[in-house]
Amino acid sequence: MTGVTGAWRLLDGDGVAAADGLALDEALMTRYGRGRPDCPPTLRLYSYRSHCALVGRYQDLAAEVDLDACGRTGTDVSRRLTGGGAIVMGRGQLGVAYVDRAPAGRRPRAIIEDLSAALAAGLAQLGVTTVFHGKNDLETGGRKIAGLGLYLDPAGAMLFHASVLADLDVELMLAVLRVPAAKLEGKAIAAVTERVTTVSAETGRRHDATTVRPSIAAGFAATFGARLEPGLPDQAEQAQARALARGRYGSPAWLDERTMVGDGSGSAVLKAPAGLARIHLTTHGDLVKSAIVAGDFNELAPEVVALESGLRWRRLDEDAVAAVVRGSGVAVALGVPAERVVAAVLEAGRQAGRRA
């Protein structure tokens, strides 16, 4: 990490709306890179209003969130700038945003793992021992207790997000999120409770965002040798956050960014070490008009973009699709055999053909 020791700015807050919370995180990030590259890091520890459903940067909103259920339950919806999976946030979950200059030459997963150590140190103060697992989770006893995500800005700044499960309304989560069976390795959706835990469950004491916040702050301070100084967003950050909340995070275009629409569309799920991917195709006859690969990725690999581009206006023929998959390098990037990628593309094509 770069420039992390010394005095940091510490921000807090509770009960924020989905668009407002995400917009301020992005506004804080713009201090770094182009703007004020020599300022110290900012750590924001806050909670959302109960409740908000937030999808990852590269996910398909409609595939991850039941929008009708959100309407019935009054659940706010938005899309994060960072990657990762869909989450439900409220007073029972602590939102963590860390902004700084991006360390040169570090891959996103390595940065996330570095920062996960601070969360682990904070949770240890509460009596919960955790390990970093997979691509973006903290786990205790094999169950997820925090999800992590990262965005690297082209200007040299970074935004790290985490959601710490102090408590969780599992029934509401299952109502508003579409938990895919493939992600649960064939288990029933109700088995999600076997894969997720909370600080409350692990300690036997009721916790929420406010009770875990001091420990998480202390974990960051101890891990990075930082002195946390409480502060507030400045006027420029507040103004930019208001503009982003209206123009980006509350905008239908942003919410639907990776949503496939139109007749003759189909999709297939591909489970991979790099994340659960959904391959969406829009077709005209046996031609692929457009392709989108959506998923709970931390970053959108160039090989995924190459696959999307290479499939356009190709025929849904096994040999033709296999050639695109091989040429894109996507199988290696996702960590699955090329044959499985080809099969998923062809299945999405079959689904599209039935709906045309």
Image (tube, helix red, strand yellow):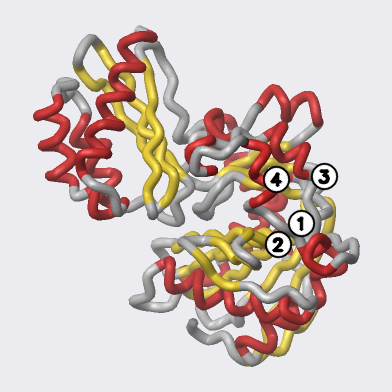
Q: Residue 208 location in percent, x, y?
A: 85, 60
Residue 257 relative to residue 284: left or right: right
Which is nearer the N-term, disc 3 or disc 1? 3
Single out the residue that lies furthest toward the right: 206
**Other-residue count near label 3 (Cα within 10 Å), few / some / many at <14 / 14–19 / ≥20:** many
Closer to the camera in the image, 227 or 145: 145
Residue 278 sits above or below residue 355 on the image: below
Q: Residues within 10 Å of mark 1 (few under 14, many from 20)?
A: many
Task: Give the left or right position of residue 36, taking residue 353 as reference.
Answer: right
Which one is earlier in the sequence, the residue at label 1 or at label 4? 4
Distance CA(mark 2)–CA(mark 3): 15 Å
Labelled disc at residue 88: 4
Label pair 1/4, CB-CB below 8 angstroms: yes
* Badge nearest the viewer, 2 or 3: 2
Contact, mark 2 vs mark 1 (Cβ under 8 Å): yes
- For disc 3, the marked residue is 50
Say left or right for 230 vs 349. right
Residue shown at 49%/35% (left/top)? 60
Residue type pointed to by label 3: Ser
Identified by mark 2, the residue type is: Val
Query: Which residue lies under the disc numbered 2?
Result: 164
Q: Which mark is residue 93?
A: 1
State whether residue 84 is above or below residue 187.
below
Please report the residue visible at 52 percent of the width from the left and 52 percent of the height from the top.
Answer: 84
Instruction: Give the residue displayed 72% in from the left and 79% down from the top.
Output: 124
- Whichever of callouts 4 and 3 sits on the residue coming sooner in the sequence is 3
Left or right placement of residue 24 versus residue 266 in this view: right
